[in-house]
Image: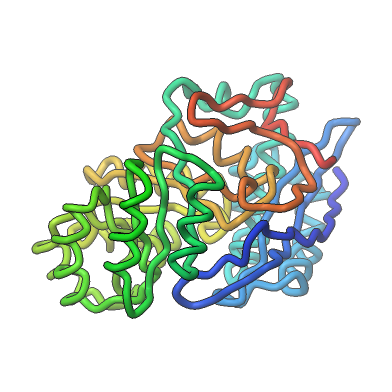
Amino acid sequence: MKLSYQVFDLPLKHTFTIAHQSRDIQDTLIVKLEEEGVYGLGESTTNPFYGMTIENMSACLEEARPVVEGRIWKTPEELWEKSKEIFKDNPFAQCALDMAAWDWFTKKQGKKLYEYLNLNPKNIPLTNFTIGIDTVEKMVAKMKEVDWPIYKIKLGTQNDLEIVRELRKHTDSTFRIDANCAWTAEQAIRYSEELAKLGVEFMEQPLGKDDLEGMKEVFQFSKLPVMADESCIVESDVKKCHGLFHAINVKLVKAGGITPGLRMIHEAKSLGMKTMVGCMTESSVGITAIAHIAPLLDYVDMDGAMLLAKDPARGVMITPEKVAFPEGPGIGAELV
């Protein structure tokens, strides 16, 4: 088994702004595992908010190299467990490795990942398309550029309600809003009443991740369902979110890959919560992996590659009508 990795700069079509950062280029690390002519690809983007850089992800992968290349594992789950101490402070790097392991493993099985997991691709929910924070005029223009049935609207400004009201004038599409921790409990409860009238489906992470008392109020009094994102990073967070959120958004990159992501989804379902998997503006490598597990979900946010001006990979093709997977087994994404 040979471990290698490459760094890519992913240029975005538009500056992407959320409540705590803006970017025009997203750095990403793509991992490759290869043995006997079969290879698997996995991906993780960098993220300054979580302190994840190309340098520290690469360092973790180098530390894990003896475990990976020594082949003291047979399945992706075994690799995840045997290397978890190495990656305990860097789940982003572990995600890229875990994803590559799943791609390689299912190719060896001669099955697509969703087939191996006994999932039906006809059950994939429609992804939303994300509109980052900008001037109202530019947000409207972005919406018109990509006519889509569901938009996720990033908020966290001084005039959030005005933004949604204006966007609503230009489309009948469903809205989901994501405040990325920017509001207080009082704001979230007050805004929810107006947002419900404006055709918003749910609110994602309205409060700071540690504001548990505030979330108790929002959960009780909000006119809209609330979904955890920053409050639900790793497996142990799922239970903590029960009774504070109606749903969780699992980010494979933050969680450490497909292996823990699947466990988080099943645990949330067992608690009666709805589930979503979201993306971190990955290329088609990471997005295609998300699509394979999407039949498990109530909602999905896998528009990352659609936001790129140039994609270094090809994989799943997503339209409002269907999700078309690459030919062949595994996850199936390829570098161009």
Extreme-left residue of the structure: 221
100 on left or right of 320: right
Q: Residue 261: image x %, image y %?
A: 48, 48
318 on left or right of 267: right
Q: Residue 238: image x %, image y %?
A: 33, 56
101 on left or right of 205: right
Query: At 46% from the left edge and 39% from the top edge, which residue is drawn?
Result: 148
Extreme-right residue of the structure: 37
**How is the structure coloured here?**
rainbow
Q: In which quarter of the image is the N terminus?
A: top right
251 on left or right of 190: right
Q: In terms of depth relative to the viewer, which is nearer, 158 or 201?
A: 158
Q: In terms of depth relative to the viewer, which is nearer, 7 or 155?
A: 155
Q: In this view, does 65 lie above or below 332?
A: below
Query: At 35% from the left edge and 76% from the top edge, which residue is drawn?
Result: 182
Q: Is residue 279 above or below residue 55?
A: above
Q: Residue 33: image x %, image y %?
A: 81, 44
Q: Residue 27: image x %, image y %?
A: 73, 65
Q: In this view, does 290 lie above or below 198?
A: above
Q: How many labels does the image show?
A: 0
Q: In which quarter of the image is the C terminus?
A: top right
Query: At 27% from the left edge and 67% from the top edge, which residue is drawn?
Result: 161
